[in-house]
Structure formats: C-alpha cells, structure tokens
C-alpha cells in the first residue's frame, strides 16, 4: 500500500466520524479493490453509510453477492443514473434479462452523455440473451457499426438458430475488429479476435 494511502487512513482514523472522511475511506478501499473491507466498514457505520447506497451495492456486486446488491438498490425510492447502471449490471449477472432490458432502455432514453455506445453494446448483449431464451421473441434492431455490436448481433442469430447467417456476421465482425484496432500490437488484436473466433 502506498505511503499516501497509509497516511490518509491515519488521518481518517482521527476524523472517522465525519461523513466526507468516511466516504473518502470507502472510495479508497474500493479503488484498492478491497471490497470486503469497504463493505465491513459500511455495515459497521450505518449512520455514516446512509448516503453510500451505490458504494455498498457495488461492493456486494463485486463480491459476487448480486441478490444482496439488488436488495440494497431496491431500498432506494428513486434511482439515480449511476444506480440504474449498476442495477442493470446486477440484473444481467442474475440472468434477469427482461428486467435488465427495461432498465437499459430507460437509461438510454433518459441520458445524454459519452456512454451511449457502451450502453447500446450492453443492451445488445441483453437482447442476444433474450433471443437465446426465446428464439421467437420480437426485439428491436440496433446498429452494428462496432465489432462489439456486430458480435452481439451474431449471438442473437445463434440464439435464433440461424447459424449460417451468424457465421457470416462473425466473419464481418472479425473484419470490423481488425479495422478498429489495427493500431494495437498483434497480441492485443488476437486477444480481441479470440472471443469472436
């Protein structure tokens, strides 16, 4: 652990009852991937943790406690965008794709920031899983301009049993992947292509 973090934790111990100091401690623990320690601290200090719903649910999620994380989020009356994003990830992990789909659609509809493409990619993964669960399900068509979106579209075709079309889509996905990351070294490209192949 760095000297800075040790010094910071020492100061926090002297001011442990202050909300901002406590919040900083939790964020530091999360940044250090010490999710169990962060969660223990949150549980130990319920008065200081009232505003740390995201941090608590995130730690639970990272500790592979998705049901508990979902309960934590469900305790909030109105979810912020950040809480909705986490809820969508939790629902995906729980394979509750219908609910996850609804949350992502709400997020995409009500947000305007630099994460639109990432959310669309996540939504396309949800749709692919929905098609796997129900091949006849009617789902919205999404753009396929990135290799991630194209890959998820191919997975959707596999879920529908359209293997020939899926294979063609995967070949196009491989080309998209090569074109979009051609500036990286060959090892990085092969890592990305490994998923597609």
Image: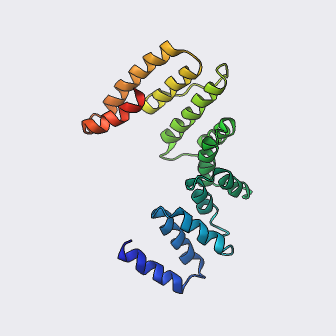
Image coordinates for residue 179, horizontal then vertical, percent:
31, 29
- In the image, residue 170 above or below residue 127: above
Image coordinates for residue 75, horizontal then vertical, percent:
73, 58
User: Which residue is at a point 67% across and 22% down the rendered structure image?
Assistant: 137
Image coordinates for residue 51, horizontal then vertical, percent:
65, 67
Report the coloring of the rendering.
Answer: rainbow
Task: Give the left or right position of residue 23, taking residue 97 as reference.
Answer: left
Q: Is residue 146 visible?
A: no
Which quadrant: the N terminus? bottom left
User: Which residue is at a point 72% across and 54% down the rendered structure image?
Assistant: 74
Which quadrant: the C terminus? top left
Image coordinates for residue 145, horizontal then vertical, percent:
44, 28
- In the image, residue 90 above or below residue 125: below
- Seen as rendered, the residue at the extreme top is 164
- In the image, residue 180 above or below residue 115: above
Q: Nearer the viewer, residue 182 or 33?
A: 33
Q: Nearer the viewer, residue 140 or 182?
A: 182
Q: Nearer the viewer, residue 181 or 68?
A: 68
User: Which residue is at a point 41% across and 32% down the rendered structure image?
Assistant: 195
- In the image, residue 133 above or below residue 102: above
Q: Is residue 8 visible?
A: yes
Task: Give the left or right position of residue 77, taking residue 25 as reference.
Answer: right
Quadrant location of residue 129?
A: top right
User: Which residue is at a point 46% across and 83% down the rendered structure image?
Assistant: 10
Q: State how many labels appear.
A: 0
Quadrant location of residue 44?
A: bottom right
Quadrant location of residue 41?
A: bottom right
């Amino acid at each position: 652990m760095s000297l800075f973090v040790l010094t910071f934790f020492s100061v926090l111990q002297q001011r442990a009852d202050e909300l901002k100091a406590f919040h900083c401690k939790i964020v530091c623990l999360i940044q250090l991937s010490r999710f169990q320690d962060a969660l223990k601290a949150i549980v130990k200090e319920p008065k200081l943790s009232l505003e740390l719903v995201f941090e608590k649910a995130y730690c639970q999620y990272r500790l592979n406690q998705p049901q508990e994380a979902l309960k934590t989020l469900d305790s909030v009356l109105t979810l912020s965008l950040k809480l909705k994003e986490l809820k969508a990830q939790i629902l995906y992990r729980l394979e509750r794709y219908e609910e996850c789909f609804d949350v992502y659609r709400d997020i995409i509809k009500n947000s305007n920031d630099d994460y639109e493409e990432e959310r669309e990619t996540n939504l396309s993964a949800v749709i692919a899983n929905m098609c796997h669960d129900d091949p006849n399900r009617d789902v919205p068509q999404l753009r396929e301009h990135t290799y991630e979106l194209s890959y998820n579209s191919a997975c959707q075709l596999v879920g529908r049993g359209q293997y020939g079309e899926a294979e063609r889509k995967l070949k196009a996905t491989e080309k998209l992947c090569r074109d979009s990351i051609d500036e990286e070294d060959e090892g990085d490209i092969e890592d990305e292509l490994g998923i597609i192949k």
